[in-house]
Each structure stands twice: as C-alpha cells, then as structure tokens.
Image (cartoon, grey):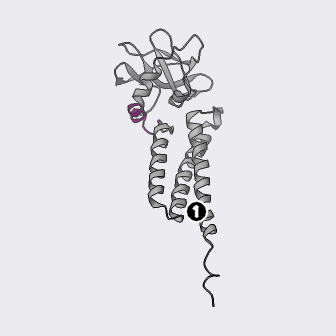
C-alpha cells in the first residue's frame, strides 16, 4: 500500500488556496471601485450598496480563507488588515454614523472645499479621489455655502454636510428641501437632513 497516491499533489493544494484569494480580491476590488466611483441607479441604490458591502466582506473572508489554506497566515493577516482599513476609509457607512463618518473624513472634506461648485444646480464634480465623499461625486453651493450631499431623493430633496462662513445654514436649499434643524459639527461645518 502506497501513501503517495493518497496525498494531494502540491499543485492542487496551491490552486485550492489561490482560488479563494483571487475570488476575494475580485469581489473586494469591485466593491471598492463602486465606493470610489458610485453609480446612481435611483431606487436600486440601497440594494446595490448592500450588495457591494457583501462583496467587500466576502472578499475579505475569501482572502483570509485562501491565506489559511496556503499556510500563509502572516501574509493573510497583513492583506486582510489592509483590506479592512481601505474598506473602512472609502466604504459608504455614513448612514450608520454620520458624525463618525465626518470626523474620520473631515480632512478630505476640507480639501474638497477648494473645488468651486460652478453654476450648475448639482454643482461640479469632485476630483476622482474625493468623489466617494458624496452620493453623486459632486459639490454644489451658492456664495460662501458648500453642500456635500450624502443622499438625494426623488423628486426633490437631499441631505448631507454644509460648510458656511460663520452662520447657520438654516433655510439653505438642498435640491428642493430647505435645511431645517442643522446640527453643528464645528469649524463652520453643519449636518442637515441626515439622521444621526
């Protein structure tokens, strides 16, 4: 009786470990691409966002499983840690904690203030690396007010973060809905039309 026939060839073990890693990276990259460059499909946005979160989480789990199958635990821990950190940075979790989202991304919003909103109703596109900060990848506003929408309703309303110069944004038009009961976030930043 030979034991050689019962052992799995090393190439099979290697392939078995590579498949979940490859699948995980593909799923995760699709989710990250969506978070960075969101596509708005109106009523299906919530479904697509949920699917992208599932892709991201499944991708991270697949990479972890693949690393364990290949006995590359240290590489797996490093890869999963990096993936989790990137997902936390760009994943759209603002609806869970709008104050927390703003606090962790405040520096990027400050950088986005440099973009002139232009004259269009929905403003001007943010640079690609900042587009994940808003639902439509744009900043709008009039005068010294800048509006960064986190959600846009149909037909007319929105909510998000506003930057003003030393005054409350109460009454400011947010795509058809006036800002009421704004919440101060400090440093001329406000949150309006967002539960949190």
Is 128 on the left-hand or right-hand side of 172? right
Instruction: Name the spot of residue 153 as percent of width and height, x first.
Output: 58, 27
Q: Is residue 179 above or below residue 43?
A: above
Name the dominant secondary structure of the magenta segment: helix
Which segment is the magenta one?
Answer: 94-104
Task: Label 1, secondary structure: give it.
Answer: helix
Q: Is residue 162 among the parts visible in the rendering?
A: yes
Foreground of the two, 93 or 77? 77
Q: Is residue 38 above or below residue 57?
A: above
Asked which quadrant contains residue 144, the reply is top left
Residue 108 on the magenta span:
no
Foreground of the two, 183 or 31? 31
Of all residues, the one furthest to the bottom in this rendering is: 1
Residue position for label 1: 17
Instruction: Name the spot of residue 196 as percent of width and height, x first.
Output: 41, 34
Instruction: Name the spot of residue 88 as percent of width and height, x first.
Output: 46, 42
């Amino acid at each position: 009786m030979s034991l050689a026939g019962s052992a799995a060839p090393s190439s099979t073990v290697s392939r078995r470990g590579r498949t979940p890693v490859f699948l995980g990276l593909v799923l995760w990259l699709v989710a990250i691409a969506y978070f960075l460059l969101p596509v708005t499909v109106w009523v299906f946005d919530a479904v697509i966002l949920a699917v992208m979160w599932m892709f991201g989480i499944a991708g991270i789990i697949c990479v972890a499983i693949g690393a364990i199958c290949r006995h590359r635990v240290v590489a797996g821990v490093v890869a999963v840690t990096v993936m989790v950190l990137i997902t936390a940075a760009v994943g759209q979790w603002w609806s869970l904690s709008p104050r927390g989202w703003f606090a962790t991304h405040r520096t990027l919003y400050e950088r986005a203030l440099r973009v002139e909103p232009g004259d269009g109703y929905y403003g001007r596109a943010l640079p690609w690396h900042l587009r994940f900060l808003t639902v439509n990848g744009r900043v709008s506003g009039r005068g010294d007010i800048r509006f960064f929408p986190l959600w846009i309703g149909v037909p007319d309303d929105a909510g998000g973060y506003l930057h003003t110069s030393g005054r409350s944004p109460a009454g400011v038009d947010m795509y058809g809905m006036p800002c009421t009961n704004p919440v101060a976030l400090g440093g001329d930043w406000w949150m309006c039309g967002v539960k949190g």
